[in-house]
Amino acid sequence: MKLASHYKIGSHRPFPSVLSQIAIISYDFIEKSQNSRPLLVYKALGDHASVEQVKVYCADFSHHKKQYVSFEHSDFQPLTVPAYRRNISFHRIFSYWIFALKIAFNPALRDCSLLYFCVPANELAIIALWYKWVLKKTVVLDVVDLWPEAFPLPSWLNHGVKFFLNLTSRPLRNWLFRQADLIVTQSAYFQEKIGSPPNSQVVLMGTTHQVDWRLKTAHRRSLQEQINILYLGSINAINDLESLIEILMRLKQHRAVHLSVVGGGKRLPYLQQQVEALGITTCFHGICFDPEVKNREFLRCHFGYNGYVSSTEVAISYKSLEYLAHGLPLLNSTKGDSRQLVESERLGFNFLPTRRSRHELVGKLLNLSDAEYYQMQQQALNTFEKYFAWPVFQQNLTQALSQLEPEPSSQSKGLNR
């Protein structure tokens, strides 16, 4: 996969003025976030001169908090859905279906010229088909995750169940996706996984985080004195803690090492226990949104840990974008886009969750000079600015939507409104 063939940055084809009334449909939605994909789409389209109105239709239940939530802005329309407590449960699937059915029979959506669905939940692809075929609406599917590939399953079930699901539900999913007027994927890796259909465009993940320009000239503490690693974000089953612990253990045998953690999750106690046994210096902040705390850690640490277990389908993570915005090279085990960017742009080091690969990674870290590290730091900032900064996301999204050719009936409705 060649990155240049997938990422089209800086193009300026006119945005279809007919797409004036837009509805964004996403089960998950976070009103105050710098990373929420549906929110970024809302902001990007709402700022466009050709768009009259954008509304978001979402669930009133937060998947991340496992509690009901409310929204301040009137453009965000929550639909009541059943709650669930476990990620892997029939209650979760039932909640998704209730949301999908409420979207299908929502009269407000019939007045929209463009329906922008964020999937999963894959049930929404069926509803999108209804709006396109029966109601003749222009439909976009934004693939923000891959189901069934990324569905969280215990390791002893993962291989067999995923094999069965890939033979059954994945072909149906890919067929459903192809019926949309446009498929948008947040990585080239996702685009390939759904078969690279001709009606698909890559719009890389974006964020409203700002580039930390202080690090264009600032130097962090010498690596020869101590290597500082930052872990940012959730600490759950999909995160590869075992590799992190082994990397820290091997580094400690040769050099002073420090771990800072800004985040939390079900496996936080396990990580704390294991790191404490290593006898290295640590700083656990828990789930923290204090910019002063985070900025202090961004300036102190040398690398951002971006490790996921091999069964996940992560090509780009939001934590990696925040690392890069602050000039933190990556210790990366994600697939696809991130792996290739790390290699081609020298943004840090890739590794695999194997003992040999972890051992090789530690050797590379120990042999890295401060001058070489400073170049990585600069490459992290430059790459973020080139691929993931907010203006780039806005351009890429509007350029992708400019490829749309709405149904004649939709055009006439939009022009006569």
Image: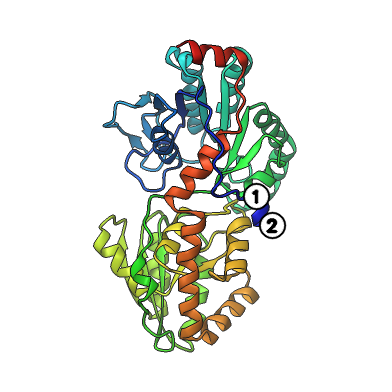
Residue nearest the observer in this picture, 198 or 95: 198
Mark 2 surroundings within 10 Å by alpha-carbon count, few (fewer than 14), some (14 through 19), many (20 or more)? few
Which image quarter holds the N terminus?
bottom right
Q: Image quadrant of residue 136?
A: top right
Q: Quadrant of residue 47?
A: top left
Q: Residue 64: horizontal and vertical position, in percent? A: 40, 43
SS of the residue under disc 2: loop
Look at label 1 and name its amino acid. His
Residue 226, which numbered label?
A: none
Mark 2 and mark 1: Cα distance apart in space: 7 Å
Q: Is residue 352 visible?
A: no
Rendered view: 3 above or below 364: above
Q: Is residue 21 left or right of residue 290?
A: right
Mark 2 is on which residue type? Lys
| Point 50% across, 86% down: residue | 369
Residue matched to label 2? 2
The residue identified by callout 1 is 6
Measuring from the top left, give residue 121's x and y in whole percent. 54, 33
Q: Nearer the viewer, residue 218 or 170?
A: 218
**Residue at 38 percent of width and 23 percent of height:** 80
